[in-house]
Amino acid sequence: MKIAIACDHGGFALKEQLLPFVTELGYEYKDFGCFSAESVDYPDIAFSVAEDVAKGEFDRGILICGTGIGVSICANKVNGIRCALCGDILSAELTRKHNDSNMLAMGGRIIGIETAKAIVRTWLTTEFEGGRHERRVQKINSYK
């Protein structure tokens, strides 16, 4: 599975801590930036990653900003993206099982590294259940 990962300045520290963890889990990733704590505009980064995930260049994407809210709003503007803002393990599990989310957003100023690791591990390893959820995901996907 190929993962696209990006952040703004508010998520930079958390992203830098998560990159080695993603490698430890055995996943290949591309870091889309940002590459320092200098202020950047999160829409530029979020749209770029979401577009590449939507095109199928990456299987999933992870976005981190200060709260996770801004990047999740941006990602969900891109057709084909189902980005879930998660701050706990249960949300990460259920968004994969029920929503087949293909992008994860987290808040670098909201959660700590151990919580973030648990969320990422859960989100990357949980499969979509399909069944009754498939119909709902198809409705999301077909909305223009």
Image (tube, rainbow, N blue to C red):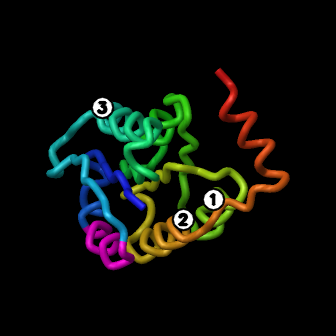
How far across and how far down the image is residue 61, in percent? 42, 51
Left or right of 130, for residue 85: left
Residue 11 % position (x, y): 31, 54
Residue 114, x across and y down, in percent: 42, 77
The CA distance from mark 2 to mark 3 is 24 Å
Q: Earlier in the sequence, mark 2 or mark 3?
A: 3
The residue lying furthest to the right in this view is 132
Q: CA distance from mark 1 to mark 2?
A: 6 Å
Q: Label for residue 96?
A: 1
Amino acid at pointer 1: Arg
Residue at image location 47% in from the left, 51% down from the top: 105
Q: Secondary structure at mark 1?
A: helix
Residue of label 3: 44
Which residue position is annotated with label 2? 123
Name the front one of labels 2 and 3.
2
**Closest to the observer: 22 or 41?**
22
Label 1 with label 2: CB-CB less than 8 Å: yes
The number of numbered badges drawn on the structure is: 3
Residue sitting nearer the eye, 21 or 128: 128
- Along the line of sight, which residue is nearer the eye, 9 or 17? 17
For the residue marked with disc 2, what is the amino acid? Trp
